[in-house]
Image: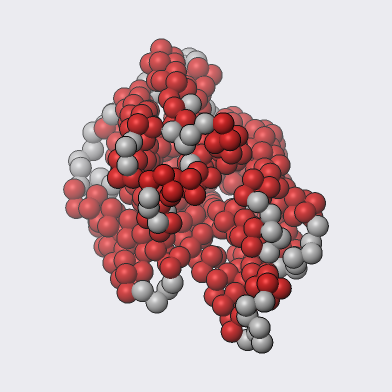
């Protein structure tokens, strides 16, 4: 770490960043519970309403690669305050939106603010904390990244019981404004803009590439037979291939993929993608099982999943400190083994499985993810030289968003395919018991694939070792 940052007061900077990140991430899950109410009020279909989520993911996936460039062109204060102002403006537009199109525009503005904020947050931590203290700092970030989305659906349910959906945005507004004021006073610049050359063609290729892949997989919910699904995925993959080849040739690439020559960073990327696919897909699959097979309400489903999500966030600072003291293997290997065991148990659940069993399994899964995610991420980034920090954080944030989007679409399509196959072989496909069993069968198929991914995570975990920063 450079000497000019030795005397920087880190805590006010960390608090400034965490406050902004908390409310931007909270808003990701705050709206989903309100979809049924919004469909009626705004007179739109479920597939149209889904664009509030799909559009959000698209903007984030497209913007994060460019964040590596932005954090080299502008100061920490400029990027963070700019991101928070855009997010706050989006929150205001969403709250006063007279119709769906304006609401969608507001959500896209929120997504732009969130997409720029997360890489800045991680890049700043890398700059102001030495490697031996990064685990605890990244653990604090992990708390925010997991805790905020976890309480979103429950908080949303409470708000919607007493107020209309617009209050989901109005309540966030004063906190977002407070974050801007707090950051304006306490957030100090910790980076010097180097203003590298802007390669416009790389930006176009990354936008088409990441946007096409996310859009294609997000559209697969209505079936994989559509030309739109395959066409967008193939277009995205072709653009990504051209993007990769171009980055390797440029002297100042938009996203420096040479970071992958550091083995711990590469292993981290694989582990992070598996974790994001597992977490997001499970959070999507379990509500289908709870509501479709167990007959639970949306609110009850959220309550079953709340303890695990909260514990995951609360454990992040602890796992960060354990990482600083004992290194990554002490957490990542047992975490990966626990994840594999839990995913196998999920393949055995039935409609008669007690609710407490689901709570225990979900808590165990989220504990295993907290043991892997932030320690692996910190360890991978620790191996990178300082010049790769913006690129490393942008790569991990981009691929985690893409993996999460792909995971949800992929696992839900496996579930629906298994469900359809079961009903096709049933003597009485319209019988309620058969519909329930079909749902369980489909979920089993999806979790079987999840179990295979977890086994891959165990294999990768055994190759993990503590990183040594080449410049420290």
User: Residue 114 lies in what quarter of the image?
Assistant: top left
Number of numbered labels in the structure image = 0
Query: On the picture, is 278 further left or further right than 248?
Result: right
Foreground of the two, 121 or 155: 155
User: Residue 94 lies in what quarter of the image?
Assistant: top left
Residue 183 in sight in this render:
no
Give how far across and how far down residue 38 sits, in percent: 44, 45
Foreground of the two, 10 or 471: 10
Give how far across and how far down residue 458 sits, in percent: 66, 60
Residue in the picture at 47% in, 36% down: 165
Foreground of the two, 153 or 404: 153
Query: On the picture, is 152 further left or further right than 438?
Result: left
User: Residue 194 lies in what quarter of the image?
Assistant: top left
Give how far across and how far down residue 272 sits, in percent: 54, 52
Relative vertical location of residue 414 with respect to residue 22 in this rendering, above or below: below
Residue 211 in sight in this render:
yes
Give how far across and how far down residue 143 sits, in percent: 60, 35
Residue in the picture at 43% in, 68% down: 222
Foreground of the two, 95 or 249: 95
Relative vertical location of residue 192 with respect to residue 40 in this rendering, above or below: above
Residue in the picture at 28% in, 67% down: 235
Question: What coloring was used for the rendering?
Answer: secondary structure
Residue in the picture at 54% in, 65% down: 412
């Amino acid at each position: 770490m450079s000497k000019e940052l030795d005397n920087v007061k880190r805590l006010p900077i960390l608090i400034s960043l965490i406050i902004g990140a908390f409310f931007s991430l909270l808003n990701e899950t705050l709206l989903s519970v309100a979809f049924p109410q919004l469909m009626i009020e705004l007179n739109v279909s479920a597939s149209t309403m889904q664009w509030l989520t799909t559009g959000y993911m698209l903007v984030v996936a497209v913007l994060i690669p460019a964040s590596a460039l932005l954090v080299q062109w502008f100061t920490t204060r400029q990027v963070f305050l700019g991101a928070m102002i855009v997010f706050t403006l989006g929150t205001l537009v969403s709250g006063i939106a007279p119709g769906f199109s304006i609401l969608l525009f507001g959500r896209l503005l929120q997504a732009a603010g969130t997409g720029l904020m997360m890489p800045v947050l991680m890049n700043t931590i890398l700059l102001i904390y030495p490697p031996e203290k990064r685990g605890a700092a990244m653990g604090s970030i992990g708390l925010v990244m997991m805790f905020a989305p976890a309480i979103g659906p429950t908080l949303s349910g409470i708000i919607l019981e007493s107020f209309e959906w617009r209050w989901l945005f109005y309540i966030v507004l004063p906190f977002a404004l407070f974050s801007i004021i707090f950051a304006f006073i306490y957030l100090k610049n910790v980076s010097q803009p180097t203003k590298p050359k802007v390669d416009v063609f790389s930006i176009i290729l990354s936008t088409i590439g990441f946007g096409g892949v996310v859009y294609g997989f997000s559209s697969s919910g209505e079936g994989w037979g559509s030309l739109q699904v395959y066409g967008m995925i193939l277009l995205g993959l072709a653009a990504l291939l051209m993007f990769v080849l171009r980055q390797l040739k440029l002297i100042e690439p938009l996203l420096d993929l040479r970071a992958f020559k550091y083995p711990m960073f590469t292993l981290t990327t694989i582990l992070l993608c598996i974790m994001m696919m597992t977490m997001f897909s499970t959070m999507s699959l379990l509500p289908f099982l709870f509501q479709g097979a167990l007959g639970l309400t949306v609110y009850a489903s959220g309550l079953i999943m709340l303890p695990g999500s909260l514990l995951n966030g609360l454990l992040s600072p602890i796992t960060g400190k354990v990482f600083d003291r004992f290194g990554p293997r002490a957490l990542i290997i047992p975490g990966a083994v626990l994840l594999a065991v839990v995913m196998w148990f999920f393949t055995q659940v039935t409609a008669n499985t007690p609710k407490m069993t689901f709570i225990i399994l979900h808590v165990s899964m989220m504990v295993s993810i907290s043991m892997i995610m932030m320690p692996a991420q910190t360890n991978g980034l620790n191996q990178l030289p300082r010049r790769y920090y913006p690129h490393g954080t942008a790569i991990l944030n981009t691929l985690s968003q893409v993996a999460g989007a792909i995971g949800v679409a992929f696992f839900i399509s496996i579930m629906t395919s298994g469900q359809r196959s079961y009903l096709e072989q049933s003597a009485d496909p319209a019988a309620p018991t058969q519909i329930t069993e079909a749902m369980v069968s489909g979920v089993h198929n999806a979790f079987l694939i999840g179990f295979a991914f977890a086994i891959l995570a165990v294999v990768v975990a055994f190759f993990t070792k503590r990183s040594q920063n080449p410049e420290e």
